[in-house]
Image (tube, grey):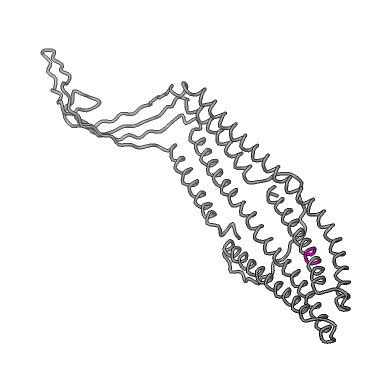
Amino acid sequence: MSKANYPLSKQRDLIAKTKEYNIDNIAKGIIPQFSVNGTATYQSDVTHIGVPPFTTPVIPKDQYNLHGEISQTLTDFGINKQKREISGIDADFQQQNLEAELFNLRGRVNQIFFGIILIDEQLVQNDLSKQDIQTGINKVQAGINNGTDFNSSLNKLKAELLTTDQHSIDLRASRKAYTDILSLFINQQIDENVVLQKPGQPVLAGDSINRPELKAYDLQIRSYTEQQRLTRISNYPQLNAFFQTGIGSPSPVNFLAPELSGFYITGLRLSWNFGGFYTYKKDKLINKNNQDMVLAQRNTFLFNTSLTMRQQNADIVRYQQLMQSDNEIINLRRSVKQASTVQLQNGVITANDYLLDINAEAQARQALVLHEVQLLMSQYNYKTTSGN
């Protein structure tokens, strides 16, 4: 949904249309070409033929020529097809670069989504802490009623309860900010109280890399390969058939006819530009260097992506190990808190001691929640980084 709504995705249709227009224009290069040319000149002298007793017309010094020409290439050698192939590859390369940029949206959406999941888990744990504090308030209140405890202990617990409420307010404000950002990404209104489904543990598909950037690099190398072939076949001789007709004064086909008259010329035209042979060898080396540079960029991308995946995999192992110890710590802290609850009721410990034990268990639960979400996020980031 974010990809569909992201402004950059609008380029997808534009690139496709441009590709279609370019290929259609190139294809027109093999159909007969028509041109119109005209000249009007004045020259300092003209040819005179004086062989008595023959007389020839006087050719005027001002001369005019207007003609049209239609020509058809007879030896394309696949140049037009090659140009269309290159144009299509370049358009596909642009599309793939666009896909690579849009692919980065996955990571941004992951951050927002798991940020909301983490806040939801923290709110749950915060509510549990409030319940523990309320339990302490109830027991202290009972002690006050029995004359075995003091209002100062009750006030400490109430102050801690208010502090916990403030933390919930901060968390909900952060959650609303995250949902507002997510609403902008997908262009749909999301209620700040929406419940997001916590994803399960994903299956990691090995260490293979299937990112769209790789296809973009491959297309770029392929484009250089096809460009080199076009350079080679462009050096071949070109043979065209042409038909030229028009009017001229004097006639271009009979310069002894000074009056304005029509004419036509038809035949074959051979052209062979040898200039390309002078630079062909170096052009080939330049093309090879360009391919090697793209290949180096591709290998660098693979190297950096592999490093990121290794770091993410190390984070996955770390969070799994931390969660094991988190559960043990929570069990120990819970047993201590339960004992503190009884001791508080019997007046053995103060409200401060009770709050310390409550906060210690709360911190242990928060650590487990944080590591659970961090583990999920690392796993999904690993899948995103690998393109799987």
Q: Which residue appears farthest toward the top when viewing the image?
A: 52
Instruction: Give me the residue at 72% from left, 75% from top.
Output: 159
Q: Main secondary structure of the magenta part?
A: helix
Residue 270: x and y in percent read 40, 24
Report the magenta residues as a range.
361-365
Q: Is residue 244 above or below residue 153?
A: above
Quadrant in which residue 39 is drawn = top left
Q: Which residue appears farthest toward the bottom when viewing the image?
A: 145
Residue 125: x and y in percent read 76, 69
Quadrant in which residue 152 is drawn = bottom right
Instruction: Give me the residue at 81% from left, 84% from top.
Output: 144
Residue 262: x and y in percent read 23, 32
Q: In this view, does 197 lie above or below 324?
A: below
Q: Does the magenta stretch include residue 363?
A: yes
Q: Does the magenta stretch include residue 259?
A: no
Answer left or right for 269 relative to 135.
Answer: left
Quadrant occupied by the N terminus: bottom right
Count of marks, rendered view: 0
Residue 37 vs residue 314, the one in the foreground: 314
Residue 94: x and y in percent read 54, 45
Answer left or right for 258 relative to 106.
Answer: left
Instruction: Give me the residue at 58% from left, 49% from top.
Output: 101
